[in-house]
Amino acid sequence: MMNTYYIVRHGETVYQTKKEKIIYPWPEVSPLSLTNRGVKEIKTLAKKLKKAKVDELRSSPRCADACVIDLIYSSDIFRARQTAEIIAKELGLKVNFDSRLRDINLGIYHGRKKEEFYRDFPRVFPLRFIKRPPGGESWQDVQKRMLNFLKKIDKKQKGKNILIVSHGDPLWLLEGAIKGWNLEKFSKTSKPNYIQPGELRKL
């Protein structure tokens, strides 16, 4: 029996509000917490999951009116940990943390202005997909580790509703891979279709 996967991007942080022009610090250096609004949004999501009233969950053939999340896997970066733990507390579950669900490592660009990164790494395909920043990862690197994670879970678990808590780029790359997107499709992904902070989707 196949697993059913749901993805959640961590809740809002100050880097989606006051510091939107700066690339977040690398997690081992400076933990980044959710904003008060971010915490509130995730708590609301957790309550909806508990009551199985989220449309994505109801669409699952296993759900009906009593579907529950069986397992939670999360990035071990603090903002994702915080998000996953809020949800897990509401659902009475524990969180399985995995470094393969971490955000993309942008190497030397962490803590610097986004305009510097986009100047050196413009959204040009296929180069943008395979080019690595010094000390960091390419989109292709991130997609491979996300898919490796999913393959491992599929071997270990069967017939489960599994929630994955991670970050914007990794979830975008995983979703695209599962849906069979080619590079042209990735290049045309618009901002409104990119998973937002605190958003739940079914893979």
Image: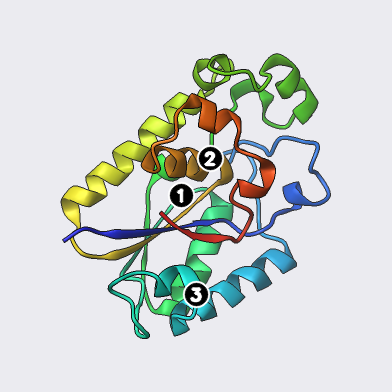
Q: Measured from the top left, where is residue 163 in percent x and y?
A: 40, 61
Q: How is the image coloured?
A: rainbow
What's under tag 2, amino acid-wise?
A: Asp
State which mark lies toward you, 1 or 3. 3
Q: Quadrant of residue 164?
A: bottom left
Q: Residue at x 66, y 18 (%)?
A: 121
Question: Which residue is labeled 1 in the image?
Answer: 75
Sequence-first tag of 3 and 2: 3
Query: 10 Å neighbourhood of mark 1: few (<14), some, or many (≥20)?
Result: many
Question: Which residue is labeled 2 in the image?
Answer: 103
Q: Secondary structure at mark 2?
A: loop
Residue 126 is marked as none
- Please tell me whether residue 19 is drawn above or below residue 131 in the rendered image: below
Query: 10 Å neighbourhood of mark 3: few (<14), some, or many (≥20)?
Result: some
Q: Residue at x 23, y 44 (%)?
A: 152
Sequence-first tag of 1 and 2: 1
**Is residue 102 visible from the viewing direction of this image?**
no
Which quadrant is home to the N terminus?
bottom left
Query: 10 Å neighbourhood of mark 2: few (<14), some, or many (≥20)?
Result: many
Does residue 122 appear left or right of residue 10 in this picture? Answer: right
Sequence-first tag of 1 and 3: 3
Q: Which of 57/73 is in front? A: 57
Circle 1/circle 2 CB separation < 8 Å: yes
Q: Residue at x 70, y 15 (%)?
A: 120
**Is residue 3 visible from the viewing direction of this image?**
yes
Q: Between marks 3 and 2, how big is the CA–CA gap?
A: 26 Å
Q: Which of 51/166 is in front? A: 51
Q: Measured from the top left, where is residue 202 in percent x and y?
A: 43, 59
Question: Which residue is labeled 3 in the image?
Answer: 54
What's under tag 3, amino acid-wise?
A: Val
